[in-house]
Image (spheres, rainbow, N blue to C red):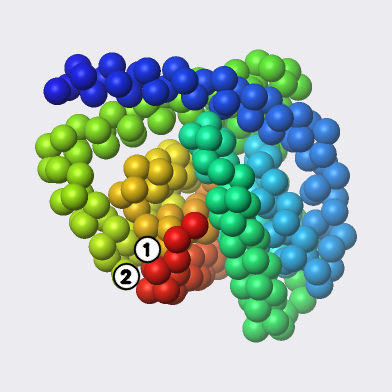
Amino acid sequence: MFWDAVIETAADGVKILPFLFITYLAMEYIEHRAGDKAESLVQKAGRFGPAIGSLLGAVPQCGFSAAASNLYAGRIITLGTLLSIFWSTSDEMLPVLISAQVSGAVILKVLGIKILIGAAAGTAVDLVARKKHLQGKDHGRLKIEEMCDHQNCRCGEGKIIRSAFSHTLQIALFIFVISLCLELLIGWLGEDSLRMALAGRTIWGPVLAGAVGLIPNCAASVTLTQLYLEGLLGAGSMIAGLLVGAGVGLLVLFRVNEDLGENLKITALLYGVGVVFGIIMEAAGLVL
């Protein structure tokens, strides 16, 4: 059973490589052509920061959530704008859905839900906070290139094809490992038993998916998306985890923002809102 699962998973992995590479090539092009413009736009957004931040966060760009953490540490953007970007960040969800040839309508629904929740919740945070952020009080910025070096994605090298190829191999490996584990788990427990354990919990599904979303790297979004594609995770649970998942944004925030208590509150708010919306969607029986 093990080798059958390995062969089947590897064959499926090879099929998605072209889709992943083309997707990452487009993402790298967007990053290099529009990355600085997006950062500048969110800085100048003012009270519309959460809405604009949510829209820009949904655009697949390497390091945008990390850039948002830097901007917030310097009090250049508001807390609501930071969180709206975190909530809408796509991370690796979009390439995985595209490589699985999911319909465009489903992808647009997922992105639309994340954008709307990010914009609305971020605006609410700013309204409740009623606090003006100080301009120019920089707590020390971490260059996005430093974080990319740590993640070995080579985003800052300016070599679009090489970077896209690197991303493709990394995510393909993640998908292979996760898919293989799922195949073995399904073979051992049975598909019906596993589906009931993961998707049959209105509350605990989003709670657990949100916890996975807190993992500060691409493994989280890949895992959540793959579980959904396998039919083992409900739409609400997947959305909960993807809302919480902010890529490396949280990791950068804890590194550049000196106030640990504030960072913990931001993390709790990020997690709480994602889980609450996930529970609501699961309870409503939402199907994408």
Q: In the drawing, what numbered circle is on residue 176?
A: none
The number of numbered badges drawn on the structure is 2
| Spot occupied by residue 273 in the image (x, y as percentages of width and height) | 50, 70
Residue that badge 1 annotates: 206
Residue 92 sits above or below residue 129 on the image: above
**Looking at the image, which is closer to me, 163 or 149?**
163
Instruction: Tell me how far mark 2 sits from mark 1, CA to CA.
Output: 6 Å
| Spot occupied by residue 84 in the image (x, y as percentages of width and height) | 65, 63
Residue that badge 2 annotates: 203
Q: Residues within 10 Å of mark 1 (few under 14, many from 20)?
A: many
| Spot occupied by residue 181 in the image (x, y as percentages of width and height) | 26, 33
Residue at the location (24% across, 52% down)? 195
Residue 260 sits above or below residue 143 on the image: below
Position of the N terminus by quadrant: top left
Describe residue 218's horizontal placement relative to residue 65 as left or right: left
Describe residue 148's horizontal placement relative to residue 272 as left or right: right
Q: Which amino acid does the dot numbered 2 rest on? A: Ile
Residues marked 2 and 1 touching at CB (< 8 Å): yes
Residue at the location (34% across, 53% down)? 233
Residue at the location (26% across, 20% down)? 6
Q: Which amino acid does the dot numbered 1 rest on? A: Pro
Q: Secondary structure at mark 2?
A: loop
